[in-house]
Structures are given as C-alpha cells and as structure tokens.
Image (cartoon, grey):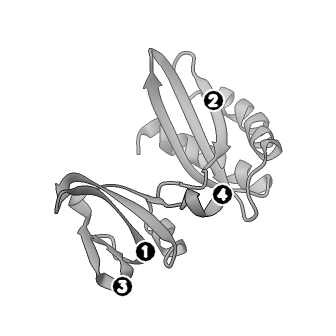
Amino acid sequence: MSKVERIVTALAAPVAAAAGCELWNVEFVREGGRAVLRVYIDREGGVSTQHCEAVSRALDPLLDEADPIPGAYTLEVSSTGLERPLRRDSDFARFIGHAVSVRLYAPRDGAREFVGTLSGHDGQTVVLDDGALVFDKKEVALVRLHVDWTDAL
C-alpha cells in the first residue's frame, strides 16, 4: 500500500462508517496521464449511489485539507461489486464457503483460472473445494468472488 493509500484509508474509514458502510479498499493509480483515487465501500444489503455520494461529499474536504496527492486527481467512490477481489486475510475469512475464481500467474495443468468454493486460507495458501485445489500465495495473481451469471438469468 502506497503512502497516499495509507493516508486516504485513515481518512476514509471513519467517513464510510458514518455513512453506514465499511471501507473495502483504496487505490491510487495513474491512467491515461491522469491520477485517479478510487475508494471502494461495502455494506450489508448493498451499496447505493446515495451511499457513494455521501462518502464522496464527506471525504472530499478532508482530502483537500490533508492534501495527500500533489496536483489534480479524480476521486471515485464506488461499490466493491459482486465479483470483488479478496486481498486481506479478513476478506478471505469472511467469504469461506463462497464461490471464488483464482487466477494464476502461470498455467497449471493448462489452465490459469480455477473456480471453486473457498474452503481455506492461511496467508500462504488458498484452498478450494475442501482441499481438492491448493494454491501457493506466490502463484496466485488474483482471487475474487465468483458469480455464475448463467444462474442469474
């Protein structure tokens, strides 16, 4: 986590909590020559545009005062989304028993992506389907919740 992300996390967590949400993640990136600060929030029952707006309006003056980002940037506050990435140990613990997609840096048995039920995570390994698939942290590029969109239709 960068210095900007640490500062914004400290500012945004209580703002999100005051709006009835939790802070999920903060990203500071440069895209197409512009700086973008993304603040992701979550809440039981889902995040509405009103939640995003409330967090954005309350966070904006705090960012102006703290001034953690030199120059112009765009602030985006949004939901984590249904297929949110799992990054922290607490994310993994919260979603044990849920379907996840694991993307690897290099193929294993000809595949780079595996879908299964998250059954364990100890900080060094990601375990799917009660041990049928075990991935070392070093080989995992991304773990995110998986939604089977064919069931949603």
Dot 4: within a 10 Å radius of its alpha carbon, few (fewer than 14), some, or many (20 or more) residues? few
| CB atoms of marks 3 and 1 within 8 Å | no
What is the tally of numbered marks visible in this picture?
A: 4
Q: Alpha carbon of mark 2 to alpha carbon of mark 1: how far?
A: 33 Å
Check the picture and name the quadrant holding the C terminus: bottom right
Mark whose residue sits in front, 1 or 4: 4
| Amino acid type, label 3 | Asp
Q: Which mark is residue 118?
A: 1
Mark whose residue sits in front, 2 or 3: 3
Return the disc, 2 or 3, that comes first in the chain's sequence: 2
Query: Residue at coordinates 54% horizontally, 60% vertically from top-left?
Result: 147
Q: Which residue is mark 4?
A: 153
Q: Where residue 118 sits: x, y (%)? A: 43, 74
* Residue 142 visible at all: yes
| Amino acid type, label 1 | Leu
Looking at the picture, does residue 110 appear above or below residue 49?
below
Q: Where residue 83 sits: x, y (%)? A: 54, 55
Dot 1: within a 10 Å radius of its alpha carbon, few (fewer than 14), some, or many (20 or more) residues? many
Q: Which mark is residue 75?
A: 2
Q: Alpha carbon of mark 2 to alpha carbon of mark 4: how far?
A: 34 Å
| CB atoms of marks 1 and 4 within 8 Å | no
Q: Alpha carbon of mark 1 to alpha carbon of mark 4: how far?
A: 24 Å
Return the disc, 4 or 3, that comes first in the chain's sequence: 3
| Amino acid type, label 4 | Leu
Classify residue 52 by image quadrant.
Answer: top right
Query: Residue at coordinates 53% horizontally, 41% vertically from top-left?
Result: 7
Return the disc, 2 or 4, that comes first in the chain's sequence: 2
Q: Where residue 115 sits: x, y (%)? A: 39, 65
Q: Alpha carbon of mark 3 to alpha carbon of mark 1: how far?
A: 8 Å
